[in-house]
Amino acid sequence: MGRHRPRQNSDQDGDGDTQVMPAQGRGRNLVAAEDEVHTVQVKNVRKAFGNFKVLEGLNLNFVDDAVTTILGPSGTGKSVLLKHIVGLLAPDAGEVIVFDQDIWKISEVERQELRKKFGVLFQDGALFGSMNIYDNVAFPLRKHTNKRESEIRDIVMTRLEEVGLAKAIHKAPGEVSGGMKKRAGFARALVLNPSVVMFDEPDSGLDPVRTALLNELILKMHEEHGGTYVLVTHDISTARRVSDYVGVLWKGQLVHYGPSEEAFNSPDPFVRQFLSGQPAGPLGMD
């Protein structure tokens, strides 16, 4: 079970509409101790594709048992960072430490074993079109464990019930909505009980209502199962709703990292402009 996450504060205006406040103060003390152990650490990571420098000496320790959102303009390296953490991209320089191991100083077999501790939700859910929803969610268990089919069914149905898809098990990915695909992908990401769950723009392509519902699901699952959650998104409302911590990338470097409340009250001109969506500031069209 995850740590207790009190619901966010809310105020009501004269019409009775609830105004959602930033996710500040949820859970434990959000100021990490200097000697705190971090499951995921990025140390001085550099990555370039040809002459295009994406990450330039990035340092970031993700706080365990918390939801961290990574924000930043398009092309600033957010998804590239996720691919480094799960061992899909090797850095040109620097270290990626996961579960106390530099994942690029171990063998590919060891990296594959390490990946079993990760759950990943991709933008479109990344479901197999030839499989129904049930078989998509069961796939990691069949591939990576020796569990009996009866055990697999219990786990799969539990996860599908949690995301509200227990009645859609026989449907193909092409027969369900984008929001349902993402929920199925979320269920699949959780079937191996991962210690780290990563979301690559989970709200991409969703309307505001379904984005809000997905955010509630992320909070609910984190409260129930715990773990280190890392989200990459462009959606500021998602960041406000789900984040314990916020990191902001710009030009390959981390320009802000800290509790959500600090980010949304930052005096830094770039952070303030980006999170408020104002045209005036250091971020332009280039």
Image: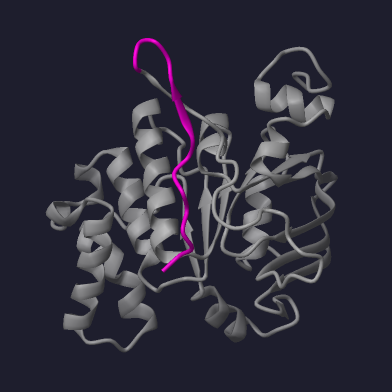
Magenta segment: does it hold 111?
A: no
Q: Which image quadrant is residue 70 in?
A: top right
Residue 23 horizontal side relative to residue 186, left or right: right
Q: Quadrant of the C terminus?
A: top right
The residue at 71%/73% (across/down) is 37
Residue 11 horizontal side relative to residue 180, left or right: right
Q: Position of residue 49 (x, y in %)?
A: 77, 50
Residue 256 horizontal side relative to residue 62, left or right: right
Depth order, front residue of 174/114: 114
Depth order, front residue of 69/1: 1
Depth order, front residue of 18/125: 18
The residue at 65%/71% (across/down) is 39
Q: Quadrant of the N terminus?
A: bottom left
Q: Main secondary structure of the magenta part?
A: loop
Regarding residue 247, the answer to whether it shows in the image is yes
Residue 217 horizontal side relative to residue 198, left or right: left
Q: Position of residue 221 (x, y in %)?
A: 39, 56
| Numbered-mark total | 0
Q: Give above or below for 275 relative to 24.
A: above
The residue at 32%/58% (across/down) is 128
Q: Position of residue 42 (x, y in %)?
A: 76, 63
Q: Position of residue 132 (x, y in %)?
A: 20, 58
Q: Give above or below for 50 relative to 210.
A: below
Regarding residue 131, the answer to whether it shows in the image is no
Which region shows up in magenta?
1-16
The residue at 83%/29% (across/down) is 268
Magenta segment: does it hold 2?
A: yes
Q: Give above or below for 76 relative to 103.
A: above
Colour basis: one colour
Q: Give above or below for 107 relative to 11.
A: below
